[in-house]
Amino acid sequence: MPTVLKNWRWHNRRMSKFWRLIGFLVVSLAASAPAGASLLGYVGECVPFARTASGIAIYGDAWTWWDKAAGHYARGNRPRPGAVIVFARSARLQLGHVAVVSRVVDDRVLMITHANWSRINGARGHVEQDVTLTDVSAAGDWSLVKLWFRDNRGLGKSSYAVSGFIYAPAKAAAPEVTAPAPDYVGALIDVYAR
């Protein structure tokens, strides 16, 4: 094969990879936070939303975040505003789930903001702000939770295992993670009065 043809093929392959990478970056940036757009208008998977809303730069399926955070971010089993809660992989959550803690209401109740959980207008992927989540673990250590599900208009029937909380760098969480006046009373009613 002539050297010119070999060089052209090599160059063509390299440029193809380059443009695929550029295309991926453009699509990723556009999907994560368009300029001037609110995070609350995001529609997509939970991972890009949680990454953008929290400032925690972890990539991969939601269930992998816990291990990937080791050595890079502080982790623990106590909720804090701005932290990412990592739902473990299970038969029901094959890719896990991640959400951002928006408010701590009491020792066993908090509010989260997340994407791709409840159906909104018949479709998954939308963001829900200040959703009730409660610790249902016997030890009160946040290892098992239930959360508000729009279709039920209350807490869902399923419980989900949690790996823990990844703590965001100081002041990294986006302001839209919580509303100016969230419904604390509604969160407590969801948990204790139903």
Image: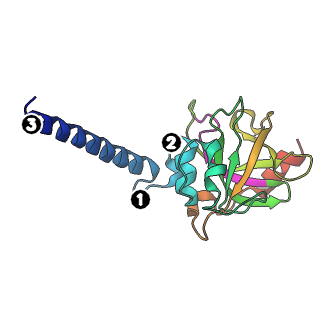
Q: Disc 3 designates what residue?
A: 3
Q: Mark 3: which secondary structure?
A: helix
Q: Mark 2: which secondary structure?
A: loop
Q: Percent position (x, y) of residue 3?
A: 9, 36
What span is in magenta?
110-120
Nearest the viewer among 181 and 23 is 23
Q: CA distance from mark 1 to mark 2?
A: 16 Å
- Give me the residue at 75% from left, 46% from top: 162
Nearest the viewer among 118 and 171 is 171
Q: Percent position (x, y) of residue 9?
A: 17, 35
Nearest the viewer among 139 and 189 is 139
- Give me the residue at 74% from left, 37% from top: 153
Quadrant containing the C terminus in the rendered view: top right
Q: Amino acid at mark 2?
A: Val
Q: Disc 2 designates what residue?
A: 43
Q: Percent position (x, y) of residue 76?
A: 75, 59
- Give me the residue at 58% from left, 29% from top: 122
Q: Disc 1 designates what residue?
A: 36
Left or right side of 57 for 147:
right
CB atoms at circles 2 and 3 under 8 Å apart? no
